Structure formats: C-alpha cells, structure tokens
Amino acid sequence: MTDVAIVGIGIHPFGRHDGVSGMEQGAHAVRTACKDAGVEWKDIQFAFGGSAAAGAADTMVSQLGLTGLLFINVANGCATGGSALFSAYNTIRSGAYDLGIAVGFDKHERGAFRVQSEGRGVDWYGGSGMALTTQFFGMKINRYMETYGVSERSLARVAAKAFRNGELNPNAWRRKALSEDEVLASPMLSYPLTQYMFCSPGEGGVALILARGDQAHKYTKKPVFLKAAVVRSRRFGSFEVLAPSLSIDWSAGPTVDASKAAFEIAGIGPKDVDIAQLQDTESGAEIMHMAENGFCEHGEQEQMLAKGETEIGGRLPVNTDGGCLANGEPIGASGLRQVYENVLQLRGDAGKRQVQGDPKVAYTHVYGAPGISGVNILSR
Amino acid sequence: MAQVSIRDDILQLTPEGPRLIGSRCKACDNHVFPFVKGCARCTGTEMERVVLGTRGKLWAWTIQGFPPKAPPYLGETDPTKFRPYGVGYVELPGQVKVEARLTEADPRKLQTGLPMQLTTVPLSKDKDGNEIVTFAFAPIGQGA
C-alpha cells in the first residue's frame, strides 16, 4: 500500500467569532490548506468532513465550488476529525484516489455542553442534574489523584503551561498566561477541577490535504507522513463519560487500545515520540492521558510536571499549541487542530513555540463521548 | 404534598423506600442501570428487569459547582439560589456501579469507599404541586 503524506494545512483561528458561521470557518480552513499545498479546490478529488453543531460539512461545496467531488460527512463525536482523517488516509492508501482533504469545523453555544437524551419519556438523566461531561472528568481525575498520588498543584501546572503555550500561538483563543495560583483560585466547577482547568466549547476550523506519498513533493518541500491513524470505541468494563452505570468489571479505556494499535502500525514506541498533543478537556485529562498513551507510568506525571518535562523546552513537549485549554473545543475541528500543530512543528514552522532539536515524530490523541479515542502518528 | 418519581420505570417510590430498576442478563448475570435490552458483556438478549440493591460503596465522586443548563435540568438553575451537589458512582456489591446524586456536597466529607444508602432528593414541582424527586445516595450514618 502507498504511503500517505500531509501536503497542505489550513486553520481558521479558534475562539469566538460573532457573525461568522462554523461552516464559513471550515471553508476558510479549506482555502488556506489549498493555498498551502499550491492546489486549487477543483484539484481535490475527495473530502471527508464533519461538525457536531454547525451543519453538514458537504454543503460547504456551495461556497467552495461545485466541482462534483466525492464528499462524505463524518459524525463521530469528539473523534469526528480523527475519523475524517482515518477515512482520507485509507482512501489514499487503498489507491482509490491521489489527493483529498479532511476538514472539521464547529460553533458551539457558550457554557458546558448541553446533553439531552432523546427517546421516550422524561429525560431523567439530564433532568436529575447528571449528564454533564464535566462531572465525568471531575470524578475520573479525583479517583486517579487518590489512587496515584497526583496533586492539585499538578493540575494547575498543566493549565498554566497550556495558557503559556497559547500565548505563543496566534490562532489560539486564550492568549493570556495565568499563574498556577490564579488557576487554583478560580471557581470550583467540578471538584477538584476549577474553571481555568477546563477547556470551553468554542469555534474554529481546520483542513488537511493528503496526497500519495510518492507524489508529495509535487505539492510541498516539507511533506509530513501519516504513519498511523486509529479510532477505537470502548470495551466492556471501561470508565467512560456520560455513563448512567458502569460494570463492576474493569478494563482500560479506548485510549489504551488506540495507542497500542497506532504504535504497532507505525512500528515505533512511545520513546520514539518527540512531541505529543494529548486530549486536555481539562488539566487532569492531560495527566491521565500521558500514562494511558504509554508515555509514562501512572503516577510518574507528578515528577514529570514538577521538572517541566512536558514544556516546549522539555523532554516530551505536550500540547505545544496550548491544547484544548487554550484553544477551546470546537468538536469537529479539535482533533485536526492537533495534527495541524504537529505538521507545523515537524516542518519547523511553529515560530515562537517551535520545539528545538529537529523533531521527527509527533503524536496526537483525542478522547470524547461516549468513550471513543483517536490516535495519529506523524513523521518526517 | 405528595412525592413523585422523576420516572417510574427508573425509580420506584415504595413504602419501604426508593428502589432503582435495572436489568440483569440471564446468561452472564451482568447488571445494568437503567434497563437495557441487550447485554454489553456477553451480547446476550435475555434481559430481565430487577430491583437493584440499595446499599453500596462510593467508587468515584465530584461536586457539581455550577447550575446545569435547563433543559434538561429540572432542579434549581438560578445562580443566586443554586447550591452545589455531589455526584458519584456507588458500587452495589455483585451488581453494578450506579451514577447518582449524593446528598453530601462537602469534599471533606466524601471519600472513595464510603458506605452509602439509596435515598431521594427533590428537584422541582409538577403542575399538580407534587414534588418531583430523583434518586441519590447518602453516606450511611449521616441522616440517610
């Protein structure tokens, strides 16, 4: 099977953009990505795209140009972007097409995600004051901290790092550094997580142009190769968001499965990774996902964070663009933002937040409802 | 003023106290709350309705510190009147871990492993003036 390269990247700044629809942000990202790859929209042979709350992606052709291309809508919760990328990757790998695009965008209302169950009768779950994703993250990290001795200071360190990195990212939403003490002093939303430890639903768009590896140099001097694209759902016994009940059995979640599979496909291990973008819905998620993705043992994060090992200048920089904490979470675009950042970093084009030492391998991970993970591994 | 369950097929209010209705897989004994028609453990489809246990141990917990959005929330959403409440998973021995409101909202009084008892908490009133309640767990020995 043929190699697959990312040859063009485009982004619409994340944040709040009154008067600009989510789809317009997606279309902006597509145009930017085409320009980056030196191609026209009419050259794109196929597209996979999605949003959770901003409309069917395929209707964006009416503002990009009606070229008759194959366009498939992807809807897979927080793994929407990862699923679009998985689909585009395999469409090229199979030999069906040579040049395509993965696009994701979104625009959410302010405040925590509103989760309403459909079906018969009263919505007892949300009605009772549960069905909040924030509660799951509070419960999971609370239990994790108790089990593995992770401190509240570590939660604050992760958030402070995110806002420091966001300050260096012109496309980030939150671009003001906050001290660890400011993070700890902000209102408690879901114990032990405070306001500034949580990301917010937001807006933004990202597009990535993929090509056959052997044709990549037609489009770019700096192709980045997609070595693995994996999406996994949960297995029985795992602890997942929005679950009215959990089994008394126990199994690791989809992140562990997706990570193992991705490393196996890429033929490398966690020690070979130079940069990682890990789902940081809140500070605790980044901490737990460091271990779930194989980058450390459970509990080791406390020391790693104290030593600054996940800072841009550290041993394994994590969430170099500020992650979800500084960028917010437009569901459809969030996973692709991580890949966008890794491509910039591997090209050496990340500006003030560029990771030094000539990084060669970069890793992305998303996690979301109802218990789904996506992992991508990129290399130069 | 009468109390009514938020939904009778989830929570039944009996003279002996509140009862949660779940399902049990006849093939592998897997318990799920609320009732489901298929078993996520063994893929079986012979599920029966069962009344779940009323005591267990706290397995994970947090405190809801801001008012949830309405809809869907039926309780107090006015930020000036809202009071934080606990949410956690309570492991019912040999059955299932159920996510529920907790009657305790002080983090200093909650910890994993705490014995808990099923009870109810009020949410709002229905059009007939009845008090709509949902299920909750209270630490045993603290007014359950």
Image (spheres, coloured by chain):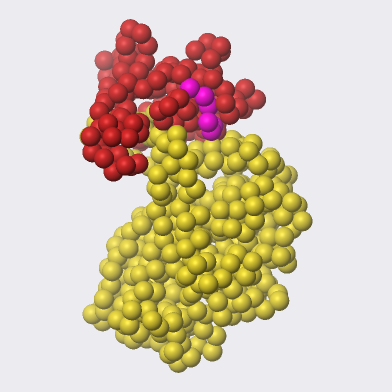
Q: Please give the count of numbered marks on the rendered protein.
A: 0
Rendered-image quadrant of the C terminus of chain A = bottom right
Q: Residue furthest bottom?
A: A218
Q: Nearer the viewer, residue A37 or A302?
A: A302
Q: Mainly helix, strand or loop, the magenta region?
A: strand
Image colour for chain B is red
Placement of A187 over or under A342, stated as above or below: above
Q: Residue at x 60, y 41 (%)?
A: A144
Q: Residue furthest front?
A: B27
Placement of B49 over or under A152, stated as above or below: above
Q: Nearer the viewer, residue A19 or A356?
A: A356
The image shows residue B117 at horizontal and vertical percentages of 47, 17
The image shows residue B48 at horizontal and vertical percentages of 25, 28
Q: Nearer the viewer, residue B94 or A15?
A: B94
Q: In which quarter of the view is residue B77 placed?
A: top left
Q: Residue at x 35, y 85 (%)?
A: A98
Rendered-image quadrant of the N terminus of chain A = bottom left
The image shows residue B21 at horizontal and vertical percentages of 31, 24
Chain that appears yellow: A
Q: Which residues are magenta?
A: B56-61
Residue A13 appears in the figure: no
Q: Is residue A57 left or right of residue A261?
A: left
Placement of A248 over or under A47, stated as above or below: above
Q: Is residue A183 left or right of residue A51?
A: right
Residue A233 appears in the figure: yes
Residue B45 is covered by the magenta coloring: no
Q: Residue at x 27, y 31 (%)?
A: B26
Q: Is residue A133 left or right of residue A122?
A: right
The image shows residue A25 at horizontal and vertical percentages of 42, 67
Q: Residue at x 28, y 34 (%)?
A: B27
